[in-house]
Image: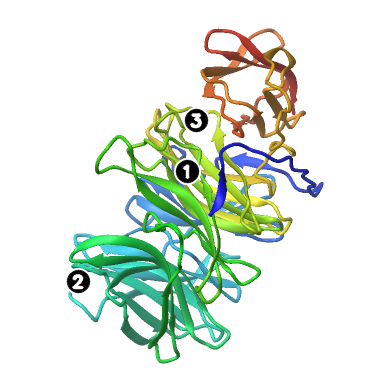
Amino acid sequence: MKKPILLISAIFICVCATAQTYFSAIPDFGGDNHEGKIFNIIPLEDQIKVIGALHDSIVPGLEGGTWQLIASISYNGELLNTKLLVDSIYTDSYIYHKRRIAFKNDSICYIYDRRNIGNPKLNSYLVELNYLTGEIIRSKIIYDTLSTYTGFLATDLTVGKGGEIYLINVFYATGANPQMITVLDSNFNIIHQSIIPNFDRDNSTKFSEISAEGNLVLVGISLGEETSVWYESKLFKQVLDENYNSIDFKVAPTNLDQSILGPDIYPVIKGCNGDYIIASQVVKPTDNCEFCLIGIPYVVSVSPDFSKVNWETRMFDGDVASSRPEFSIASITEVIDGYIFLGYTDGTHDLQTSALLGKVSLNGDSLWLKHIIPLQWDTAQAFWFYMEDIKTTPEGNILIGGYVSDGINQIIVPWIAQLDKDGCMEPGCNSVAVTEPNALTNDIFSIYPNPATSYIAINCKASIYEKCVLSIYDLSGKLVSRNPFVSEDGSQLIINIPGEVNGQFVISIKSEQGKLLYSKSIFIE
């Protein structure tokens, strides 16, 4: 196991393309009160596509509800267009849970879990979508025809070289839950369905692919069972041959039991070197509660045949005595010099509710762990974060997306941000102060950019063990904005600037007791 790191311990130099703009945006997809969500991110050369949802009480021709959408966002954070994905074939269902998407030429295939109104049984809703035009090419409901189980949860899919679709579902059963494979041709005609052998384990697929030999490879989380008591949680790889017989099944020989929390998170990728990279969690009992657990993030590298664990790296800055999971890891991506995972914290035990980013090197060295906090969502307002997807852009930067619950206004809004490969909106935000922070020399905080347009990023280079207040004043001394926050090492706080605000302003940061910690003049264009 790699040595854990709790504080940033290295200095990074960031070289970014001059045409690239870092941003943090809350796009208005057109729903009621700005409500919406981002599920999947698709970075293209000239724009960003997102798959998400909005809530609208009135949609022409249909009843109100939550609607899928595809939107285009520029690389400076501007929302270009939004299109509702209304399916003329299937409109009588409630659809939820996002899954991985699979590319099929100029289209994508994706699945949701679907429930008919008034029917408790779930089915899989499979869609092929032209992501350039937003046109639904075809869709199909996949039913459970092999069992009488009431639970039937879609887990993953992949596309073969001939356009065929391989869809994985899991049943809810007594004991170990079995998985089912459904194979469809490129026109969504079902050509095969069968139960996947589970070897008396509860397996849930989080990544699937077709190997060079033409076999179907499944990777995910596997729970073992003994006399109805769950006793271990491991990462698994299973291989099915062309007749969908299981020809290989292995669990990774990790030092600790690994878990992947939640039915709609997919923190598994195949690295450029062929290894499987998994941002998992170790669920450990806590010190202060007999039956309570805490989730500790780990990044694990496993060899292609799953016989060897190359490295396990712990990334954790929480309280080991916590009585509930503080960290949830949802997605991971590869950048030129390592792997970055995306998750979120729940705001307990003095950790601010926030998005969470962590980075390890290509050989598993822990580099940094940081909290990304839009400042206007302080701890009271940001009831919870749910970060869904992280992707690498053609320029080598990262995009993060998800949604946050606004506890004050009682709404859920989408959030997307573009950062550099070191998780910074300001180049060099991971630099460490070489002396103790001195409030009089402004060493604790830095701001970027200046001049600013759509956002201001404030980097915290040290922890202040008390609440702080950031205020923005115009030159007449009028208070424009007041935002309480907690300064944490490596945190990056983001203020989105309303379009009507421009001119010269003064930013000041004071402790809760009124001590001045930072003051800076900034121009907003």
Of 81 and 445, the residue lying toward us: 445
The Cα atoms of the two marked residues, 1 and 2, are separated by: 33 Å
Q: Quadrant of the C terminus?
A: top right
| Mark 3 or 1, closer to the camera | 1
| Mark 1 or 2, closer to the camera | 1
Residue 286 image offset from top left, x and y in percent? 33, 40
Specify the label residue 377 is tagged with: 3
366 sits to left or right of 28: right
Residue tagged 1:
344
Looking at the image, the residue that sits furthest to the bottom is 243
Occupied quadrant, residue 162: bottom right
Of 423 and 55, the residue lying toward us: 423
Residue 228 visible to an observer of this rendering: yes
What is the number of callouts on the image? 3
- Looking at the image, do the residues carrying marks 3 and 1 touch, with CB atoms under 8 Å apart? no
Residue 280 image offset from top left, x and y in percent? 46, 56
Specify the label residue 71 is tagged with: none
Determine whether the residue tagged by mark 3 lies in a helix, strand or loop.
loop
Q: Amino acid at mark 1?
A: Tyr
Of 251 and 507, the residue lying toward us: 251
Residue 417 image offset from top left, x and y in percent? 60, 44
Q: Amino acid at mark 2?
A: Tyr
Which residue appears at 47% of the width and 60% of the height?
266
Residue 262 image offset from top left, x and y in percent? 37, 55
Closer to the chain start, of discs 1 and 2, is 2
Which residue appears at 67% of the width and 50% of the height?
74
Closer to the chain start, of discs 3 and 2, is 2
Residue tagged 2:
149
